[in-house]
Image: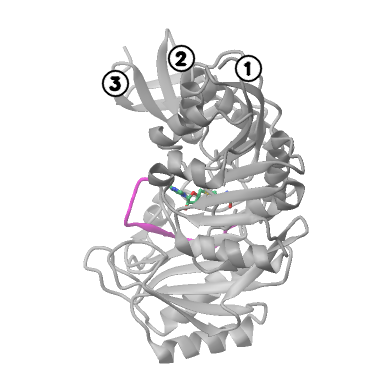
Amino acid sequence: MIKRGSVLELVVEKVADRGKSLTRIDGYVIFIQGGIPGDRLRVQIRKAKRKFAEATILEVLEPSPDRIEARCFHFGTCGGCKWQHMSYDAQLAAKRQSIEDALRREGGLDGISVNEVIGADRVFRYRNKMEFSFSADRWLTDQEIKSGEPLDKSYALGLHVPGNFSKVLDLKECHLHSEEGERLLNRFRSFTRELEWKPWNIRNHTGFLRHLVLRKSANTSDFMVNLVTNGYNEERMEACAALFKDEFPEVSTFVNTINTSVAQTAFGEEIRTIYGSGVITDKIGRYTFEIASNAFFQTNTHQAEKLYRVAAEFAELKPTDRVFDLYSGAGTISIYIAEKVAHVTAVELIEAATENARRNAEANGVKNVTFITGDMMKLFREDFIEEHGRPDVLIVDPPRAGMHPKVVDQIIRLRPERFVYVSCNPISQAKDLAKMKDVFEIEAVQPVDLFPHTYHIENVVKLRARPNG
Ligand SMILES: C[S@@+](CC[C@H](N)C(=O)[O-])C[C@H]1O[C@@H](n2cnc3c(N)ncnc32)[C@H](O)[C@@H]1O
């Protein structure tokens, strides 16, 4: 009988949702944090329910051939990477399997073949954006606690530890962002500590420093520092500007976002450009995109291009096509495909993103896209179709939650001949696809990896309206 506290030996069978792994003993599922398929482990059960248990690793008795040394010192504590200890080939296989599982389990879609994942050429330092948090509540690792050394818990600059909304891991290295970013993170920590500027305290809502957001363009030399603070302080911003100009000449623009609200976000009520243009530019294909401090832009530029290429190919675009690009963000997909089609209608919820999209279209000489700001759930009705016409091709790229049921119903009524569904969440995508399976046939499924060392994946599904759907 498996109960809380039990210690047992097992062999990991496969990966499970959210980066976990699992094994089954007489049909009873045991989820193991940090296991890799093929690992023989001694584990301890920390939670036992009727249908499943959760276990932590006590010892790796025999490592899986896919187990490798994690590169980062913080691996295991930090929430950023979950799979640095797994070979990249095994990560890709696991991601592909997670999509097959989602289609079968969440969508009841059996027998769909999923292509090999398009992997990344660069598996470290691929992120063009990192959002670090300041906190007056530092997370101490077991190692640090055991060291017996005096430790200051009142300051941290880094990433939140998983499952803890207030504590932040004081991050000294991060291999997902640029080397310059890592150096700046560490220097900024010592700089603000020497000056005794206080980090944000989530409990009593005091402190000045809230977030340090770094954006480094992949294809130009632009580099933005966006410091999010609780209020504006001219003297301090001048001191930061002097530091960056002096020690980090690669910082092309420095902005200060002011967020005095209690909400833990890097957005704010005011954005001040301290120096530089206040934006960075990056390139996808031959298109240039201006990215403001608060704009959504795929965090892996190189892989985003591969993603858009797949989406465009799946759409089988023709010069006469009228396309809908729904959930369009800063208009990247619309702009990428515009020259291949007659017209694109793009819909996005956030006005700032639409404004960004319009500017980006203009800068790239793209004239055949209509950008609309609105909530898909309210907007996507018969009058919308009457106004904008029936599309030949529909491309959707909704947020993690997937599409609202009303949007799904409208797509079913609309029945465009070609339909491409891009998603960063195979589970919500599979649920949406299940509702549409009588109307659209799945012709191809192509995952693209934008997030090495994490369990996240982008998935592109090619659909076609069934003749008698
Ligand atoms: C995954 S992003 C896709 C962005 C874009 N396709 C790209 O590749 O950069 C999803 C976008 O959907 C937008 N969004 C979320 N809910 C929405 C809604 N109800 N109606 C319209 N857009 C929405 C978000 O603001 C976000 O820009």
Tell me residue 85's x, y (percent). 60, 39
**Residue 49: which numbered mark, if any?**
3
Q: State the SS at label 3.
A: loop
Who's the residue at 58% across and 61% down the image? 357
Above or below residue 343? Residue 104 is above
Q: In this rendering, does residue 74 appear at all?
A: yes
Who's the residue at 41% across and 85% down the image? 195
Query: Is 312 on the left or on the right of 63, as rendered?
Result: right
Q: Nearer the viewer, residue 204 or 375?
A: 375
> Which residue carries the number 1 mark?
467
Callouts 2 and 1 close, C-beta under 8 Å: no
What kind of secondary structure does the magenta stretch mostly adopt?
loop
Q: Nearer the viewer, residue 98 or 146?
A: 98
Who's the residue at 66% across and 19% down the image? 113
Inter-mark Cα distance, 2 to 1: 42 Å
First in sequence: mark 1 or mark 3?
3
**Residue 24: which numbered mark, if any?**
2
Indicate yes or no whether the magenta region holds residue 253: no
Q: Which residues are magenta?
A: 163-174
Inter-mark Cα distance, 2 to 3: 14 Å
Q: State the SS at label 1.
A: loop
First in sequence: mark 2 or mark 1?
2
- How many other residues sit within 10 Å of disc 2, few (<14), some (14-19) or many (≥20)? some
Who's the residue at 37% across and 69% down the image? 155
First in sequence: mark 2 or mark 3?
2
Above or below residue 201? Residue 276 is below
> Please, what is the three-letter code of the amino acid marked with disc 1?
Pro
